[in-house]
Image (cartoon, rainbow, N blue to C red):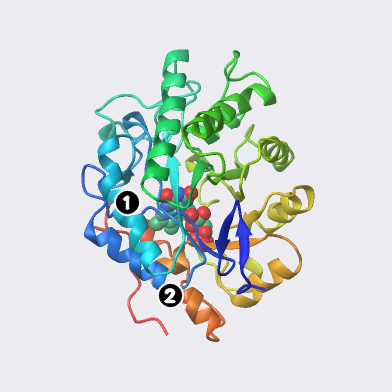
Amino acid sequence: MLFEPISIAGIDLKNRIVRSATFEKRADDDGFVTESLIDLYVELSKGGAGLIITGNALVHVTGRSAPQMLCIHNDFYTAKLKRLAEAVHRNGGKVMIQLVHGGRQCFPAHIGMERPIAPSEVYDRSTRITPRAMTDAEIWEIIEAFGYAARRAMDAGFDGIQIHGAHGYLVSEFLSPHTNRRDDYWGGDEQRRFHFLEEVYRAMKKEVRDDYPISIKMNADDFVEGGLRPEEGLRIAKRLEYLNIGAIEVSGGMYESGMKTVRPNISDVEQEAYFREVSGLFKRELNTPIIIVGGIRSKAVAEDILQNNHADLIAISRPLIREPDLPDKFRDGKERADCISCNGCMRFRKIDVVKCTRLGKSS
Ligand SMILES: Cc1cc2nc3c(=O)[nH]c(=O)nc-3n(C[C@H](O)[C@H](O)[C@H](O)COP(=O)(O)O)c2cc1C
């Protein structure tokens, strides 16, 4: 099934393999697309993935979570983003852009030495930062920024958008009872915690054509005390389905939860696909296409997930850093990715661009 075509949110894909959003550290200091980034996307699109999702792109200057990340918070980014989308299309690929605001997980050094903003002032044990609670006006400004970014994404020719609603960034912070302690329109109970995402979605819909694909990556589980659990995650997903979201990628974890999002040292099939259970739950309960991510390393596991209806698509991140042509290799008989999940690719401060730091050539 892995190499059977599928259509999600109106996009026809040649197979079920998705390059999960992966920050590349290859934009320039101002967040513009570079030749190095284009070269990588050419490689990825030639490598056979049915869908590529870009590294997270910034919708508002207050939400920068890393240096050299893609930016889409101003019209002057559109021309170069267009070159990126065109490069993928020229090589037979499809590409969605992931839109993000980093919220409380931004470091002051990346946001003009300001305190990061968030739904509430909840201390982050991992960054040792207490963010500042957003005012109502600030919340609406960021919602609008997501909307404008969506229009730029469409103007630049991306096949669709993925909202970054996972991993403890701003959208996920509003959804999570751990990070959202407000008692107003934006928080207090489950329905109100959903309002921010709902308004972001509506702002985007207002800016793009009716059938423009909008999807989301969301946490099914925050893996922190008092955080989102799969039962509530599922109810959020049902609300999104009601809004007609195009696809849902199921993930989990935030900075504070440790290495739950990007688990290290996956060495056998038992450790693979660590969000399979929640992905299966979402798949059973929803009609929206479900994308599974997290530790999928072998073709047999990917096939098994699809055969057992635990997801519709298989997203992969780290293995494609080492082998951008892994999808074609799978098609041609390779059984297992070379990636050993050592997480060397995540030592963002030590490496100039995101790359595999393990020595030796891939097979
Ligand atoms: C270097 C690196 C950068 C990442 N950047 C993003 C990102 O921009 N957006 C996102 O949603 N997830 C990001 N992730 C998480 C991956 O998309 C994925 O959820 C996670 O790595 C688990 O999948 P894997 O086992 O196939 O790597 C990143 C992961 C890595 C290793």
Q: Is residue 80 left or right of residue 2?
A: left
Foreground of the two, 90 or 111: 90
Task: Describe residue 210's horizontal placement relative to residue 189 as left or right.
Answer: left
Side (left or right) of 88 relative to 80: right
Q: Where is residue 3 in the image (x, y as percent from the top left)?
A: 60, 74
Distance in Å between CA atoms under marks 1 and 2: 23 Å
Q: What residue did someone put label 1 on? A: 82
Mark 2, Cα crowd under 10 Å, few <14 / some 14-19 / many 20+, is: some
- Locate residue 107: give its quadrant: top left
Q: Report helix, strand or loop for mark 2.
A: loop
Residue 190: name its quadrant: top right
Badge 1 amino acid: Lys
Q: Name the residue under label 2.
A: 325
| Rendered view: 176 above or below 80 | above
Q: Residue at x 38, y 43 (%)?
A: 155
Compared with residue 187, is residue 19 higher up or lower down, i.e. above or below? Answer: below
Residue 171 image offset from top left, x and y in percent: 52, 33
Is residue 133 visible in the rendered structure shown here? no
